[in-house]
Image (cartoon, rainbow, N blue to C red):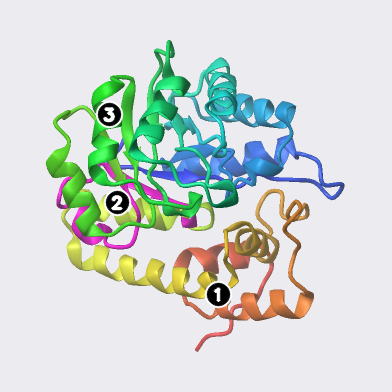
């Protein structure tokens, strides 16, 4: 098993009727086992976790454990909650499925709520009280605010079950401050892909991403090049992934739109199911525009998947 991994916030597959497609999900997850990337299940963004019913969340965790346990890291990423009571219930559901680690976000910023430092710490006190299980935390600005590195360090200090911090939407300066303040050497820090050319060399444990849903082999190659000190090749792959991110960014506020468009174009497992409300698949003309740009990127893994889907690649 490689030392470095990318923990991918996995999408959730649905069938034509809009129900959880369990068989497609198994096949989709196998791609990560094959690429030796870790998974985060039921994320609120890429996994559409807020749109999943309680029983569906349970099945997503159970299927993930059945396919991945003992082969790659299989973690849960329950959608952020406004109250500690609900976050605790979601955490216990994931623990019952025997995932490796449960990520617990801070309280959601509903109706403009932004917690004080006291409220933020009390939230984790209430969620984690009596839970002796590996926990990750994620200071992520997408939930409506950004806790300081010092506040994250305090959560890690108070709660020894915190084994990892997952960073998204932050730059090198945030990472450096967090690493400098964190006294516990046993807490892993997973960094976002942007700036990772630097942050991996500065002590990042690995990557956390959504793009790995579509490019698992490319992310594996990127990390392999880092471990083998093939930095020229790593730089080339970094440029490829960066071009991919620039292309898909046009279809974001969150990730389900572009992920499910890419799935449909490349006919990945579960491609027929689409998204759940409040998302809607873009019109066909918009999907075609996305497809033209995607296939024009010249990324080897995209072209490999396109050929498997029966698509012709126009050479530039």
Callout 3: 10 Å neighbours few (<14), some, many (20+)?
many
Residue 3 visible to an observer of this rendering: no
Q: Of tags 2 and 3, which is closer to the observer?
A: 3
Q: Position of residue 243 (x, y in %)?
A: 42, 74
Q: Position of residue 211 (x, y in %)?
A: 48, 57
Mark closer to the chain start, 1 or 2: 2
Q: Secondary structure at mark 2?
A: helix
- Say which quarter of the image contains residue 169: bottom left
Q: Are marks 3 and 1 in contact (CB under 8 Å)?
A: no
Q: Position of 182 compared to 314: left or right? A: left
Span shown in magenta: 191-211
- Say which quarter of the image contains residue 261: bottom right
197 magenta-colored: yes
Query: Residue visible at 82% across and 46% down?
Result: 18
Cα gap from disc 1 to disc 2, whole angstroms: 26 Å
Query: Residue visible at 69% across and 59% down?
Result: 267
**Residue beneath disc 2:** 223
Q: Of tags 3 and 1, which is closer to the observer?
A: 3
What label does residue 250 carry, if any?
A: 1
Q: Position of residue 63 (x, y in %)?
A: 63, 28
Q: Secondary structure at mark 1?
A: helix
Relative to 26, residue 226 above or below = below
Please tell me which residue lies in front, 149 or 291.
149
Residue 220 visible to an observer of this rendering: yes
55 magenta-colored: no
Name the image quarter holding the N terminus.
Answer: top left
Callout 2: 10 Å neighbours few (<14), some, many (20+)?
many
**Residue beneath disc 3:** 156
Cα gap from disc 2 to disc 3, whole angstroms: 27 Å
Callout 1: 10 Å neighbours few (<14), some, many (20+)?
few
């Amino acid at each position: 098993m490689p030392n470095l991994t990318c923990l991918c916030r996995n999408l959730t597959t649905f069938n034509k009727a809009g129900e959880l497609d369990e068989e497609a999900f198994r096949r989709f997850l196998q791609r990560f086992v094959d690429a030796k990337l870790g998974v985060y299940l039921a994320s609120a963004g890429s996994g559409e976790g807020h749109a999943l019913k309680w029983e569906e969340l349970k099945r997503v965790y159970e299927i993930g454990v059945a396919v991945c346990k003992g082969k790659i890291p299989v973690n849960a990423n329950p959608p952020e909650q406004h109250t500690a009571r609900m976050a605790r219930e979601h955490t216990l559901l994931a623990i019952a499925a025997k995932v490796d680690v449960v990520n617990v976000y801070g309280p959601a910023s509903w109706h403009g709520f932004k917690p004080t430092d006291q409220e933020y710490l009390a939230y984790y006190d209430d969620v984690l009280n009596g839970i002796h299980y590996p926990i990750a935390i994620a200071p992520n600005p997408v939930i409506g605010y950004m806790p300081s590195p010092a506040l994250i360090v305090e959560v890690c200090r108070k709660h020894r079950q915190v084994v990892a911090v997952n960073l998204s939407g932050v730059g090198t300066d945030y990472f450096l401050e967090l690493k400098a303040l964190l006294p516990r050497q046993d807490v892993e820090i997973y960094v976002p892909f942007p700036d990772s050319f630097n942050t991996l060399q500065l002590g990042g444990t690995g990557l956390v991403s959504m793009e790995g849903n579509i490019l698992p082999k490319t992310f594996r190659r990127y990390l392999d090049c880092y471990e083998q000190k093939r930095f020229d090749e790593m730089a080339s792959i970094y440029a490829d992934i960066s071009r991919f991110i620039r292309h898909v960014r046009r279809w974001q506020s969150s990730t389900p739109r572009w992920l499910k468009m890419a799935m449909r174009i490349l006919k990945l497992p579960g491609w027929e199911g689409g998204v759940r409300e409040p998302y809607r698949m873009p019109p066909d003309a918009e999907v075609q525009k996305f497809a033209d740009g995607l296939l024009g990127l010249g990324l080897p893994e995209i072209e490999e998947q396109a050929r498997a889907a029966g698509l012709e690649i126009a050479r530039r």
